[in-house]
Amino acid sequence: MLTSLVSKVLLTLTLVSFSTNLYASKPLKLSVDKTQQKNFIKAERLALKSHSAQYQILYNQLHYYPLQPYLDQKRLMHTMRLSDAEEITQFLKKYQGSPLDWPLRKKWLNYLAQKKQTVLFLEAYQPTANAKLVCHKLRFDLLSGMPESVVLPEVTKLWTVGKSQDKTCDPLFERWQKAGYRTNDIVWQRVGLAADGGKHTLIPYLTKLLPPEQRYLAKLWHKVRRDPAKVSKLKYFPNKSIRETEILTYGLKRLIWRYPDTAIRSYINAKKKFSFTTEQQRQITEKFALALSSKNHHAAQLWLDKLDIHSLSKSMLQKRLSQALQQQDWQRLIVEIKQLPTTYKEELKWKYWYARALIATGAKERGNYLLQQLANERHYYGFLAASYLRAPANLKHKPLTFTLAEKQKVLSLPAAKRAFEFYALGRYLAARSEWNYLMTQLSHREKLIVAKVANENQWFDRTIFTLAKAGYLDDVDLRFPKAFDDEINRYASKQKIAPSWAFAIARRESSFMTDAHSPVGARGLMQLMPKTAKNLKRGKFKSRSLLNADHNIQLGTKYLKILLDKNNGNQVLATASYNAGPYRVKRWLKNSKALPADIWIETIPFKETRNYVKSVLAYQEIYQHQPGKVSELFDKVINMSIGG
């Protein structure tokens, strides 16, 4: 587990220089003060008894400890009193914007609102997305004499959302309503927000706020939200009004995903009787094209061709050009790419496919020239181009170097000390919060410095994310560390899979964040779902064990081997299965004719999986790269067929 690893880690510091620096220092090793850590943990437990002699002794011993302010925060949050106003105000001022700020400020503001302390509340208030606190703030603004003409338009923004707001806002909303701000148009805006991605259960309440003659429309919108097939029966839309057309547009865009043929017929019939705006027609056409191409529907190309290529989103361009790729209609692909906006033409993806199309249509010299330019890129398409030309990949590695003085300067910042101390304690969420705050305090150069520092402390995910956000992508060793080298090599060898593949999967899944959690419940370094892990374990299993790096890698590599065997040794399909699930990939294969692997990858229906497979392949090439040699991995991709 990384916690035990970190306790052994000697913190290292380094700083950036863009050129070779003769004075660049070796990692500066700082030992962890375990005594101070133990004292801090003891003091935390006693913080609610801050007047006790034992706590005071511990607190004083921690005077220079980076995390001592968290003891003050905990004490101040425990029992709020107006008599503490000065101390709280000074604390919030000192740590404004840091993780020490908001938990205390939020509780303090709610306390002041409860005590009706207008002046103190307005002094302590900071802009927030917390609707309850915003309502308190606007109410206090009115009480302090601010004109309604200034305050009430802000209330409109609070009310016009697709969900219910806190009851605290009700008195404010009532005053806003009496002042005439709740118009029918505002109510309709909220109905639309509630129906389209919001809480549709709010619509019955909003219906009552409309004039009697309009309520049927809100009820209709609610019905269409629950059952889009209602739009196939135009009798529900008797007046052919602007609102009815708006509801029809909404319903058709939902129906196409459920019942494509019904949606197409319904739209054709509706166009004969309803006056859809140009924008509504564009939205419907784009949604139809997207849904139909995602489903490989026979009418997909017809709807894709209706779209104006100059106004398409990137996702729709992908769908449209994918159709030409699937059919290997190279001439059409050339025509389509030539019509792309200049910014899209410059993307490596379309440069690669334009070159491939030229070669396929006989313009080999021009196509090979374009591939030669691409082959210098450290990118999925660069690696494809290099292999197509039988040339070695170019990683363009430019390591960053640092001086001792620069290291010490960055590590002297209080936020840096707090971040690394939380990390050493194994409190990764708190460590990341402090890290994120630290990033707001640093120059571009200092961000690169601290990214290197994190890598040397084996805090790999912060290095990876920070370099990406800072835009420095050329230190390949920092961006693609061989983290958990022993564990990955051991378990990959046991499963007889390429360690570079396992490294690439872990790098793509979590950036080596051991406590990573996905929105759907996947956990740990290799982002395993608890249900999958339980089946792999075949015995007693606790979901929390997935946060143990060794255990996660053991099960993750085992799962990769299972997927590889299920796909007859095809690593591309196994990678796609790891992301999208084996049954979904099996369904894609069933609906696909035999295609060159690079085309199959480019036309994977799911954008997430499509990008995932490309990333893993590129990452694996970096992890197994042999300078001066043609990539064996991408050579297979170039010469392999999938499907059929």
Image (tube, rainbow, N blue to C red):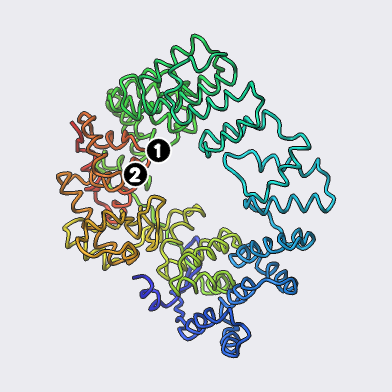
Residue at (16% x, 58% y) in the render: 496
Residue 19 falls left or right of residue 64 = left
Q: Can you say which quadrant of the picture contains the C terminus? A: top left
For label 2, count other residues whose C-alpha is less than 10 Å away and answer few (under 14), some (14-19) or many (20+).
many
Q: Amino acid at mark 1?
A: Leu
Find residue 6 and report its image quarter: bottom left
**Of callouts 1 and 2, the N-terminal one:** 1
For label 1, count other residues whose C-alpha is less than 10 Å away and answer few (under 14), some (14-19) or many (20+).
some
Residue at (37% x, 28% y) in the render: 258
Q: Which mark is residue 380?
A: 2
Instruction: Name the element at disc 1.
Output: helix
Look at mark 1 in the image and give the residue it sits on. Answer: 348
Residue lying furthest top = 272
Instruction: Name the element at disc 2.
Output: helix
Disc 1, disc 2: CB below 8 Å? Answer: yes
Residue 329: x percent and y percent? 29, 22
Question: How far apart are the alpha carbons under marks 1 and 2?
Answer: 9 Å
Q: Amino acid at mark 2?
A: Tyr
Residue 140: x percent and y percent? 77, 53
Residue 472: x percent and y percent? 48, 54
